[in-house]
Image (spheres, helix red, strand yellow):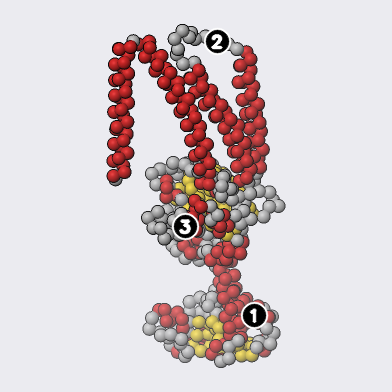
């Protein structure tokens, strides 16, 4: 607060001094005469302009050198993408030519102000036209601009090239919305599912994904942008409301996100986050504490993160669109990807708004087969008969009958596959009921259900000698029959490995 008051006081004092100088100048003019005062004023202004030119150019070059390690493209901030060097090179060439023009024009500007200041006895000479000068200041910029445009066009064609059919790449999607980015990855199938804006529902389906498209079922939406180093990435870029801009400054990636007009950008990260940090650690500027108020806080290089930003002023919450970007090894990426949950399976599956809630999905069948095989392996290595009993969790019957539901057949096919894998295995298939109804009816029902499974296995070429079927009715509950949950557990079909 005290520093601010001192600065304000100094500014006020400077204003007062300037006003007083002006008053003194007016007074001197009255005493010495207007012409003499004007000539003296011109001389002071001309000398002042020369001094300002020298100070200005020195400060320009000094500040560029002093802050080079903070600027993109210089010091440690070389491009972290394969194409970034091309853009940085084009920028440096442009800077070289415009820098020459910048220096020469400022020298000319202030030197002419000095040389042609108003002096006694000197009359201005008017030069309305000079063909030679016209040719020079038209032709030279035209040649330079032609060179820069060609260089820029070559860089544009290289940087903006789309992927080809032979390329190995990851395609992701970034959708801008006030004030966040929706990031979508394709999942195990490597394909992003289709969208329809008519399906957008906040809280249920923010992107309008069509859940009837199988490609959508394994798509996932992480909180951060995570990518493997050395792998080409194609980013689909869209917007939902206003103009946004997908900006990854360290990778020299920037593309507008326009509502109703999908765009894309292709790039290849070449430096992991950790590699970039190690590069920063070699510079003294990045040894400073990350928290200026805490000298013991980690140095700046240790807390560095790549970032995804919106480069458009899309509203007052614009700042909150920042997302962290992590570039990792392929092994780290594969491990991270396995931990991600499908948006459909984690947030939509089984809900009232799930259009496929009555359908068994291929992904679920595959996962259940893995779980089934794991249970069989565990039972094969067990030593007690009780541990060799495996429940068929997804074998269903129509209520009160011994008729198999069609959804049960893939689970029985898993059992067929196990029996084919282990030709010496024999099993007993058993069925159980809850306590609802009379004992005799429950016993009959369970026997019929176990026999039905037995017949299904035989129909799949499993030898009858390897199978036994038995119904236990309500005699072997595994939970209480006093609750609906307990009854559901007691109604079951299972098999026990007798020999293996």
Along the viewing direction, whichever of 125 and 474 lies nearer the viewer: 125
Residue located at (49% from left, 15% from top): 116
Residue 20: percent from left, percent from top? 29, 24
Of the numbered discs in the image, which one, if any, rests on residue 76?
Answer: none
Q: Quadrant of residue 100?
A: top right
Above or below — where is 296 with respect to 473? above
Image quadrant of residue 314?
Answer: top left
Disc 3 element: loop
Of callouts 1 and 2, which one flags the residue occurring earlier in the amino acid sequence? 2
Q: Which residue is rendered at x = 46% and y = 7% of the image?
A: 121
Q: Are marks 1 and 2 in contact (CB under 8 Å)?
A: no
What residue is at 64 percent from the left and 24 percent from the top? 140
Instruction: Determine the CA span between mark 3 and mark 2.
Output: 62 Å
Classify 458 as above or below 360. below
Q: CA distance from mark 1 to mark 3?
A: 57 Å
Instruction: Give left or right: position of 12 versus 441.
Output: left
Question: Residue at (61%, 82%) from the top-left corner?
Answer: 377
On screen, residue 9 versus residue 471, left or right, reads left
Q: Is residue 409 left or right of residue 309?
A: right
Disc 2: which residue? 127
**Where does the image place residue 53, in percent across and percent down from the top left?**
48, 28
Q: Which residue is mark 3?
A: 299
Residue toward you, 236 or 318: 318
Choose the circle earlier in sequence order: 1 or 3: 3
Q: Dot 1: few (<14), some (14–19), or many (≥20) neighbours within 10 Å?
A: some
Work out whether 237 lies above or below 420.
above
Question: For the residue labelled by badge 1, is the local secondary structure a helix, a strand or a loop?
Answer: helix
Q: Secondary structure at mark 2?
A: loop
The residue that mark 1 highlights is 418
């Amino acid at each position: 607060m005290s520093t601010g008051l001192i600065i304000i006081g100094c500014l006020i004092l400077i204003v007062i001094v300037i006003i007083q100088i002006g008053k003194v100048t007016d007074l001197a003019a009255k005493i010495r005469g207007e012409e003499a005062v004007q000539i003296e004023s011109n001389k002071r202004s001309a000398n002042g302009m020369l001094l300002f030119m020298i100070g200005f150019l020195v400060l320009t070059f000094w500040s560029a050198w002093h802050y080079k390690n903070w600027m993109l493209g210089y010091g440690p901030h070389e491009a972290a993408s394969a194409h970034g060097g091309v853009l940085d090179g084009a920028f440096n060439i442009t800077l070289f030519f415009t820098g020459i023009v910048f220096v020469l024009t400022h020298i000319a500007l202030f030197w002419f102000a000095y040389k042609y200041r108003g002096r006694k006895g000197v009359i201005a000479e008017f030069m309305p036209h000079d063909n030679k000068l016209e040719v020079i200041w038209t032709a030279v910029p035209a040649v330079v601009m032609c060179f820069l445009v060609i260089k820029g066009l070559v860089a544009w064609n290289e940087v903006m090239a789309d992927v080809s059919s032979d390329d190995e790449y990851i395609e992701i999607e970034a959708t801008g919305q006030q004030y966040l980015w929706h990031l979508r990855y394709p999942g195990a199938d490597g394909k992003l599912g289709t969208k329809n804006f008519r399906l957008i529902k906040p809280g249920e389906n923010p992107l309008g994904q069509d859940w009837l498209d199988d490609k959508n079922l394994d798509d996932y939406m992480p909180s951060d942008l995570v990518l493997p180093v050395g792998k080409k990435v194609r980013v689909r870029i869209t917007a939902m409301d206003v103009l946004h801009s997908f900006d990854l400054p360290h990778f020299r990636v920037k593309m507008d996100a326009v509502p109703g007009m999908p765009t894309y950008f292709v790039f290849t990260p070449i430096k992991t986050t950790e590699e970039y940090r190690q590069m920063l650690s070699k510079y003294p500027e990045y040894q400073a504490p990350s928290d200026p108020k805490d000298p013991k806080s980690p140095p700046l290089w240790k807390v560095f993160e790549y970032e995804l930003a919106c480069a458009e002023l899309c509203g007052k919450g614009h700042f909150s669109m920042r997302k962290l970007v992590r570039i990792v090894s392929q092994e780290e990426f594969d491990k991270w990807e396995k931990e991600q949950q499908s948006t459909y399976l984690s947030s939509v599956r089984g809900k009232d708004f799930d259009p496929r809630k009555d359908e068994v999905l291929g992904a679920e069948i595959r996962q259940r087969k893995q779980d089934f095989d794991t249970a069989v392996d565990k039972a094969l290595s067990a030593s007690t008969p009780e541990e060799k009993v495996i429940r068929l969790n997804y074998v269903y019957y129509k209520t009160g009958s011994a008729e198999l539901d069609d959804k049960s057949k893939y689970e029985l096919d898993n059992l067929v596959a196990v029996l084919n894998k282990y030709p010496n295995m024999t099993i007993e298939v058993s069925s159980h009921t809850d306590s609802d109804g009379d004992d005799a009816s429950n016993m009959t029902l369970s026997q019929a259900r176990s026999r039905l499974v037995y017949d299904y296995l035989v129909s799949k070429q499993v030898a009858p000698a390897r199978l036994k079927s038995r119904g236990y009715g309500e005699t072997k509950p595994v939970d209480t029959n006093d609750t609906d949950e307990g009854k559901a557990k007691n109604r079951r079909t299972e098999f026990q490995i007798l020999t293996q």
